[in-house]
Each structure stands twice: as structure tokens, then as C-alpha cells.
Amino acid sequence: MHSYLKSYQLFCPGPVNVHPEVERASVEFALCHREEEFSELLDHTRALALEVAGIKDVTSFSAVVVTGSGTAGNEAVLSSAVPRDGRVLVLANGEFGERLAHISAVYHPNTVTQRHEWGAPIDLARLEETLSEHRFDLVVMVHHETSTGFLNPAAEVGALCHRHQTRFFVDAVSSYSADLLDLEAAHVSYMTTSSGKAIGAYPGLALVIARRDAVDELKSYPVRNHYLNLARHFSFAEERSQTPNTPALPLILAFNRALELARDEGVEGRHARLDQLAEYVRAHLLSRGFELDQPRGPRSVVLTNVKLPSIISFEELRQSLRARGFVIYGGKGPLADQVFQISTISHVGLEEIDRFFESLDEVMKSYMISLEAL
Ligand SMILES: *Cc1c(COP(=O)(O)O)cnc(C)c1O
């Protein structure tokens, strides 16, 4: 048997193990994307996406599905939502903020990045000062910084953007449907997420949600690429209930079902359930003497960063858990070999978490460690 035919329990923050109904949805129907059935599906998916985002006035927002990973959604916004010679301000306090800065700089020489230490809070006073001194067309921030577990203050940053009449783009790729984000209250003009993270479908689709007036504005901006041009995506979606090019149809079927499940569960109920799972994991870890790597502020329910005990390298830990059927992620950048990540956004329950910890105990015992001494 090829090694790629093995199944794992995924405790990483995406990809995830999907709900059986999501899996079934992806193979159940044979559709052509230029037929009426697909248009009906796409309209349904776009409406569900707004509902799961918790938007109350759905007429003031619109959504498009772009075939590509989460980065495709981010690049679509960053390349499409800025006027000629526009100025972009990126707030970064981790790996994914840095990536946004990198994408922006590819398109806009006038990209300014306000860097913070990884896991440190966004400096709101410095932001306020910067916005008072210079005019920016777009302020960009990650909601849940997946590298550190930090939940950035979207409401506060959004209020500043609103006061300075600057559009606000939030990368909610890892937080959508898990951490609460009120797009209306936070004056968010653009939000992105992907199908393969907390929403619990397969990877390969990006979702972009935009405020109605921001969508209308897109047409007046320069076209900087073809495939990811957001004005084109919105005009196909809104005028014809279509995607501009061939969509990853089985992925849309799965994503649509995952959105239905999230809608049925309810935005707040889902958040509470994921919070409980994360707290369950944290209690397990603390009772074993592991130290959590806490961000210096609010944290996401999506994952927990755990300090790597000195007696084991991340690669040893990863391989040992893999051999027992579990996948975890390590730290990135300055956190490489400092932490490992445990996420419970997969289709997972307390039983699987208990089994994971039995395996973790085995691994740690085999490394002859007295956990009490940590
Ligand atoms: C995963 C992730 C992305 C996008 O990654 P892809 O590999 O392109 O799906 C972007 N931002 C954040 C915060 C993420 O967690």
C-alpha cells in the first residue's frame, strides 16, 4: 500500500478530518458548472457564507468563492482592492501577517508594514498616530494569527480605520466559523477564509466576503492580474450566479455542506463547542506538566501552542505521533523547535482527544522523561 493511502487523525489547524456528510456531499452529485443546478448551488453557498459569518444585514455584504487555497483569497483582495498608486498598511505580529505584507509588496510599492514581535499585541497607539499622519487606502490584518494563537483586535483596529476613512481587510482564514468576528461592528470591508480550516471541508477554495460599497468600488481599480481579479469574480457571481472559470466543483459541494452544518449548529454554539475542546486539550496538557506558550493577549479557540520539552525535538515528536496515527504541526519562524501546535477544529470528539493523549504519554515515556520535573 502506498503511504499516501494511510488516514490520520489531524490535530493541525487545517487540513482537517471532515464530517462524513461533508465527504458524502463531495461525491454525491454529478453536475456541470455551466448548468442551472450549479448556479443554484453557488447562490446557496454564497448566502450561507454570509449567514455563518454572522452578518445580520445580508444585503450590505456579498461573497465569492475562488478556486485556490486561502492565499488565493488574500492575493485576490490585495491585488484588486487598491487604487492606482495606492497605499497599504499591513499590521504584522506573526507568520501570516508577514505573508500578507509580502503579497501586498508584490503589487504595491507603497506598502508599509508595522511589525510587532511574534505573539505581541498590535500597538493601537502607534497605528492611530500613523493613520493621523498619512492617508492609507487599505489597512490589512490577520484576525487569528495562526502561528501564535493570538486573536488580533479587529473591533479596535476597525474603529480606527473607520475614523480615518480607510478600508479594512481582515484575513480570517483560520478563524472563520470558530472565533467570533462581527464584520459589521468592526467596519470590515473585506474578509477572507478557506474551505480547509475551521469550517471543516476540504482545502482548495478561498472565500472572499466584501461590503456592498467595497464591491462597487472594485470596478474603478486597475486590473493587476486576471485569474484573481475580484471585480471579475463578483460580477460573474452577482450577474450570472457563475464563477469566471471552471470551479473545483466537488470542493464546492463539500464546502456547501460544511457551511450548512455550521449554520445548523449556530455561530455561537459552534464557537462554544470549539472553546470547550481547546480547554479540554489545555487541561490535559497542564495536568501532564506541559507548559503552554500563551500569546500576550486574547487567544483563539482554534489551537494551542505548547512549549516543546527539552528532551525531545519537534521532528522526533512529530514522527512518533505520526507512527501512532496523529498529525501535529510545529512552530514557524522564531517558534521553530520551540513549540508544537494542537488544534481541535477537525471532526473530532473527546474520545479521539483522549486517544491522542494516551499516545502522547507513550511517546514521552519512551523518551524517559519525568514530566513532573519539567
Ligand atoms: C492558512 C492560512 C492562510 C492561507 O494559507 P493557504 O495555505 O494558502 O491556505 C492565510 N492566513 C492565515 C491566517 C492562515 O492560517
Image (cartoon, rainbow, N blue to C red):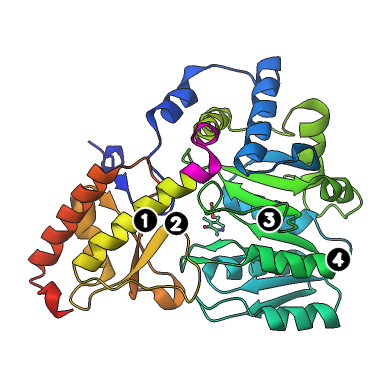
From the image, state whether disc 1 or disc 3 is nearer to you.
1
Disc 4/disc 3 C-alpha distance (Å): 22 Å
**Residue position marked by numbered label 3 in the rendering:** 75
Which is more N-terminal, label 3 or label 4?
3
In magenta stretch: residue 117? no
Disc 1/disc 4 C-alpha distance (Å): 37 Å
* Marks 3 and 2 close (CB-CB < 8 Å): no
Disc 1/disc 3 C-alpha distance (Å): 30 Å
Which is more N-terminal, label 3 or label 1?
3
* Marks 2 and 1 close (CB-CB < 8 Å): yes
Ligand 1 picture quarter: bottom right
Question: What secondary structure is marked by label 4?
Answer: loop
Question: What secondary structure is marked by label 2?
Answer: loop
Report the front residue among 289 and 110. 289
Report the front residue among 253 and 102. 253
**Residue position marked by numbered label 2 in the rendering:** 301
Disc 1 marks which amino acid?
A: Ala
Residue at disc 1, CB closer than 8 Å to ligand 1:
no
**Residue position marked by numbered label 1 in the rendering:** 278
Indicate whether 70 appears above or below 314: above
From the image, state whether disc 3 or disc 2 is nearer to you.
2
Residue at disc 3, CB closer than 8 Å to ligand 1:
no
In magenta stretch: residue 267? yes
User: What are the residue bounds of the magenta stretch?
Assistant: 262-269
Which mark, by number, is residue 165? 4
Say whether residue 62 is left or right of residue 69: right
Residue drawn 30% across the image and 57% down it: 281
Residue 190 picture location, percent across and down: 73, 53
Indicate whether 319 appears above or below 256: below
Disc 4 marks which amino acid?
A: Gln
